[in-house]
Amino acid sequence: MNHRLAAPVGITATGQCFPPKVVTNDDLAQILDTNDEWIRSRTGIRERRWVEPGTGASQLGAPALQQALDARGLKASELDLLVVTTVTPDTLFPATACRIQERVGASNAFGFDLNAACSGFLFALTTAASMVAAGAARKAAVVGVDIMSTIINKEDRATAVLFGDGAGAVILEQVDPGYGILDFEHRIDGSGGEFLFMPAGGSLKPATAETVANKEHTIHQAGSEVFKNAVREMADNSRLLLDRNGLKGEDLALFVPHQANIRIMDAAAKRLELDPARMMVNIDRYANTTTATIPTALHQAREQGRLAKGDLVILSAFGAGFTWGSTLLRWAC
Ligand code: UT7
């Protein structure tokens, strides 16, 4: 079954925001037993951005959204719906969507946060687009924002080098028939939960002095387990979208994978028989920004002139949960 929306809905503008502070691999080699060669060859990462302490997700999310609104010539008050996806909200509650809503002045919007880890942007895109297609909203925004520097264990070289901070935003509206989101395939599988998670800070294990001392409020990952599942699911899911829409890899103008590891991305692209030049890569400069990787990659692709109206694009992600999915679009602006 194709997953089609009730009406054509597409992305009509993009925005992004990164903090100015650049942290290079050499910077990390000064505080951890690691080196630039290992990080670059094993992950593709050269540098990442980290916020100054005290910076919340809404402080990156709001400027990213404002940039997208400006690009479309919209006032914030014209937004009906704001979906924010993050694993690093300003606070567990209220929702970061409320904080971003206030910062940009989206006075007529309703909204909420959605957590699907690295697949969050794709799941939020489908959720918001479905509401626009159904007429529950006319102009919607999706913001993917994460401040990963606040939840990494800076003494654990296996995870500390992988993540960065950033935000991306898109505007969604109904578009001409044949454009926008054409198909999607999303999945969750809780049996993978133990391979990538934060042990404490939720209702199961509230914060105590002991959980803080044990660094249980940081990312715990079984890297190789996540790696092999990510390659398989991102490739299989994207292949499924191609096959059921009668397309081949060469029909895609751009493949935009979640930026977790260049080796995962290359393996997925190879299995789709894609020209590597058609894969969007920004992991070298920004590392893994979790929910922000895909919207910032889309924004940069637009800036670099790599996306034009009518182009076929596949977005694909895999993350904690496990969660994964792919979305096929015909670019609408
Ligand atoms: O976005 C959410 C989804 N996340 C992902 O998709 C991440 C998926 N996993 C990965 O990207 C990779 O598994 C990692 C990049 C996390 C690790 O790469 P790997 O090739 O799987 O390495 P490994 O964990 O098997 O470690 C190989 C060696 C180990 O040393 P020994 O035991 O062989 O002596 C590690 O201790 O590399 C060592 N190592 C490091 N060395 C220098 C691990 N981290 C580092 C480091 N610097 N930062």
Image (cartoon, helix red, strand yellow):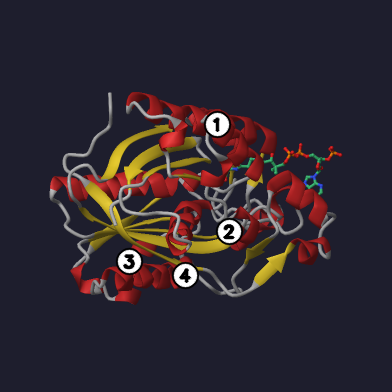
Q: CA distance from mark 3 to mark 2?
A: 20 Å
Q: Is mark 2 within 8 Å of ligand 1?
A: no
Q: Earlier in the sequence, mark 4 or mark 3?
A: 4
Residue placed furthest toward the left: 135
Q: Quadrant of ligand 1?
A: top right
**How far across and how far down the image is residue 237, in percent?**
45, 30
Q: Is residue 238 above or below residue 98?
A: above
Q: Which residue is rendered at x = 39% and y = 63% of the image?
A: 96
Mark sitting on residue 148 = 2
Q: Secondary structure at mark 1?
A: helix
Foreground mark, 1 or 4, reads 4
What's under tag 4, amino acid-wise? Leu
Give the mark nearest the N terminus, 1 or 4.
4
Q: Label 1: few (<14), some or many (≥20) within 10 Å?
A: some
Looking at the rendered structure, which numbered label has been put on residue 192? 1
What percent of the width, then of the height, locates residue 158? Answer: 74, 47
Mark 3: amino acid: Cys
User: In the depicted view, which residue is nearer to us: 78 or 333?
Assistant: 333
71, above or below 184, in the image: below
Query: Is residue 253 shown to the viewer in this render?
Result: yes
Image spot of residue 6 (x, y percent): 17, 39
Specify few, some or many for label 2: CA neighbours under 10 Å numbering under 14, 14-19, or 20 or more: many
Residue 91, visible in the rendered structure? no
Q: Which mark is residue 60?
A: 4
**Which residue occupies 31% across, 48% down?**
310
Query: Disc 3 marks which residue?
Result: 98
| Quadrant where the N terminus is found in the figure | top left
Mark 2 or mark 4: name the one nearer the start of the chain.
4
Residue 301 placed where, x, y %?
46, 57
Q: Which residue shows up at 35% across the image and 59% down it? A: 170
Q: CA distance from mark 2 to mark 4?
A: 12 Å
